[in-house]
Amino acid sequence: MSDFSISELQKLHDVARTVARLAGNYMREDQLRRRQTPLATREKLNSVDLVTAADETVEKMIKDSILKEYPDHAFIGEESYSAGEEKRFLLKDGPTWIIDPIDGTVNMVHMFPMTAISIGFCLKSIPTVGVVFAPFLGGQGTMYSAIHHPEGGAWFEELGPDGPTTPLPLTSPPPPLPLDAPKGCLFFGEYGKDRRDHPQSNLTKKAANFVNMATEIGGRGSKGGMVHGIRSLGSSTMDMVYVASGQGDIMFEAGCWEWDVCAGIAILLQTGGIVVDSNPPLNLKDSDPIPMANLGGRRYLAIRGCSEDSTGRSPRMQQEALVREVWKRTERLDYQRPV
């Protein structure tokens, strides 16, 4: 997968965990300051696409810390990307950090705890190290992380007042997917920041997709999926992490960016999950293997890891079958990169 040894990847993982904790401490202190001073926000695309001084401060904190340790590595951060004029997909094959300093800024503004620091590291365009830290969950925050490597691993930890704890492994054998999936699954999806209202808008299609997935079997012109529930956390990072950790089954997302999902994908891949395009690739035959999603494609359909089921289907067979069932129940979404 890479020219990096497992010991080098472990060091990268340790650096990312340390930086995430520092950034999380800043965010927790910043929330305490808000009791005296209201949080100032600026709109980017619209009134649900917000940025705060904390977003920019945390990104600089992470960038400076990482580049001090790895000055030759590339760095892609949400806020610096958003402020720049270059909007192409910037990822190359070299070692690259992809960062969302605060995913779930609207949640943070409202003090809803589904807010995360997402630190991803790519080699040869594949998410290889991922650290996601939710500073407002648990005692002093909750961290999910992984090294995507045969000798790597995936971990969960809740931080206490005395500092880092011993991470717990996320790699215990997960249960099979439901035999009639998506029936019986827990489904994660976001409405996103594109709120334009017309019959063919992404917002209209997403709303229809979510209703399709929730509707009884046979309903909605046979598109009913009868999932156990729809969850919209306001953070694509947290959606992806909960599927990666087996706390959900499906994440269907479009309109977000590589920094929203990079770290989560590294965790997902290490725990046996897959991520493909939320739009079925054109000309893909039923017998064709389904390719991995383009990290810069802005469309992601993630399925959790699983064990062989009672009919003898392998994990990959179950996952690809579920992907095709989700595709049958959802409309194609049109998200492009700005030019």
Image (tube, rainbow, N blue to C red):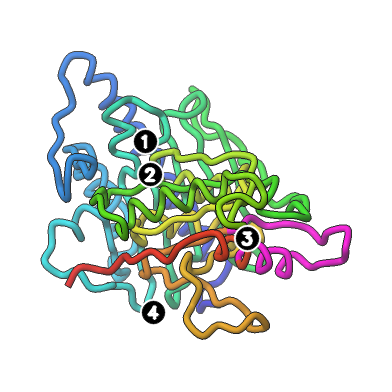
Residue at x-position 70% and y-position 52%:
171
- Mark 4, residue position: 93
Residue at 33 percent of width and 66 percent of height = 334
Q: Position of residue 271 (x, y in %)?
A: 64, 57
Residue 212 lies, in percent from the top left, at 53, 50
Which residue in the protein does label 1 denote? 24
The part of the chain drawn in magenta is: 303-323
Which marked residue is nearer to the observer: mark 3 or mark 1?
3
- To which residue does mark 3 refer? 273
The residue at which mark 2 appears reads as: 117
* Comes first in the chain, label 4 or label 3: 4
Asked if residue 93 lies in the magenta stretch, the reply is no
Q: CA distance from mark 4 to mark 1?
A: 29 Å
**Image height of 314 relative to 241, above or below:** below
Q: Answer above or below: position of 244 versus 229.
A: below
User: What crowding class fits label 1: few (fewer than 14 Cα within 10 Å), some (14-19), or many (20 or more)?
Assistant: many
* Badge 2 density bin: few <14, some 14–19, many ≥20, Cα 10 Å: many
Q: Residue at x 46, y 27 (%)?
A: 140
Q: Secondary structure at mark 1?
A: helix
Q: Amino acid at mark 2?
A: Ile
Q: Is residue 307 magenta?
A: yes
Do residues under tags 1 and 2 come within 8 Å of each other at their CB atoms? Answer: yes
Q: Secondary structure at mark 2?
A: strand
In x, y percent, where is residue 66? Answer: 32, 56
Counting the numbered discs, the total is: 4
Q: As drawn, is 128 to the left or to the right of 54? A: right
- The answer to whether 212 appears left or right of 298 in the picture is right
Image quarter in which the C terminus is found: bottom left
User: Which residue of the protein is positioned furthest toward the front in this rendering?
Assistant: 221
